[in-house]
Image (cartoon, rainbow, N blue to C red):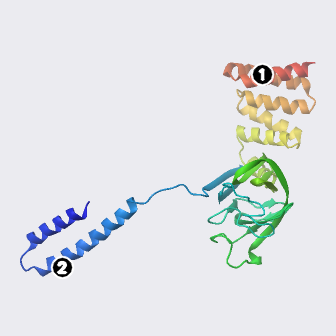
Amino acid sequence: MSFYVIKIIFNNLKILLLGDNKVYLKKLKKMKKIILIICIYSAFSYGQIKTPQPSPLSIVEQVVGLTNVTIKYSRPAMRNRTIMGDLVPYGEIWRAGANANTTIEFSDDVVVGGHSLVAGKYAIFIRPGVSMWEVFFYTKTDNGGLPEKWESDAVAAVAESSVTNLSNKVESFTISIDDLNQNGAILNFKWENTQAGLELEVPTEAKTMASIKKIMEGEPKSRDYYSAAVYFRETGRDLNKAKKWIAKAIKMDDDKYWMYRQQALILIELNETEAAIAASQTSLELATKAGNQDYVRMNKKAIDEWSN
């Protein structure tokens, strides 16, 4: 709405309210000021130019085992600059990104680079060196960049990482969670031709075993027996217990080809070859009926190998 239109409206209102009604005129002037302020604010708001951020925000969310890990950081780019030893000086604490603090949050207690961290949120700072980086996990996460005053009591852990030289340049600073497995991963920092990584260990085993114990003491369902049996086989635990659980799962739900497949794998590891082949044949029949060609191939291959 233009200021000319507003002026016309108010002039007309003045005419309508004309007469010596000072109360109405006073209110009218007050309303005019308010509306003019709103219009000016709107003009500035709609007039703002939006441009890309030089260091855009990135959020990494990853489940490692049974632990949620969330990283929030801004990603500065090389833009034809020398990074390590120049833009990021060696031997000085760096904010590990740009803008607000780079943070990492764990849903469980973890071990990073051999150091224990309780569940929670941490700011990450790095002191890079030519051959080794120090990675600081800082409990105060609301700093604009580096803390105005570095507090040693706020340092939850300092982990050291050797440096790897990369053959291909990494244009934007990158934090990634790589090489995932049930019990951990690698927390990698990459920029320019440099990479540093920390081993991340999560409490999958403790959480899983506690969950199995709790469920088995209650009223486990077919899926519970199946999951527990698979976990025991994959982690090299008591195969006889796994055998018992998978049998119970199948008894409760006897038309699942994937359950017979796992039963076959458990039995073959127990050297019960004939029973393993029989379970594979049942899995093959059910998989064929369901049209799952992956399981058809796996079962045919297993039957062929175990029959010779």
Asked if residue 90 is positioned above or below residue 183 in the image, the reply reads below
Q: Quadrant of residue 135?
A: bottom right
Q: Residue at x 75, y 53 (%)?
A: 192
Nearer the camera: disc 1 or disc 2: 2
Asked if residue 296 is positioned above or below residue 83 in the image, the reply reads above
Give the alpha-carbon distance from disc 1 to disc 2, as whole Å.
Answer: 87 Å
Amino acid type, residue under disc 1 in the picture: Arg
Q: Quadrant of residue 262?
A: top right
**Residue at the disc numbered 2:** 26
**10 Å crowding of disc 2: few (<14), some (14-19), many (20+):** few
Residue 182 drawn at (x, y percent): 79, 47
State which quarter of the image contains the N terminus: bottom left
Which of 304 and 100 lies nearest the eye of the viewer?
Answer: 100
Q: Residue furthest left?
A: 19
Tag 1's secondary structure?
helix
Residue 277 drawn at (x, y percent): 85, 22
Q: Residue at x 36, y 67 (%)?
A: 41
Q: Residue at x 15, y 80 (%)?
A: 23
**10 Å crowding of disc 1: few (<14), some (14-19), many (20+):** few
**Residue at the disc numbered 1:** 297
Which of 151 and 134 lies nearest the eye of the viewer?
Answer: 134
Residue 232 drawn at (x, y percent): 84, 42
Q: Say if residue 217 shows up in the picture.
A: no
Q: Say if residue 58 shows up in the picture.
A: yes
Asked if residue 1 is positioned above or below residue 263 in the image, the reply reads below
Question: Quick check: marks 1 and 2 in contact, CB under 8 Å?
Answer: no
State which quarter of the image contains the C terminus: top right
Amino acid type, residue under disc 2 in the picture: Lys
Tag 2's secondary structure?
helix
Residue 304 drawn at (x, y percent): 87, 19
- Reading the chain from its start, which is encountered first: label 1 or label 2? 2
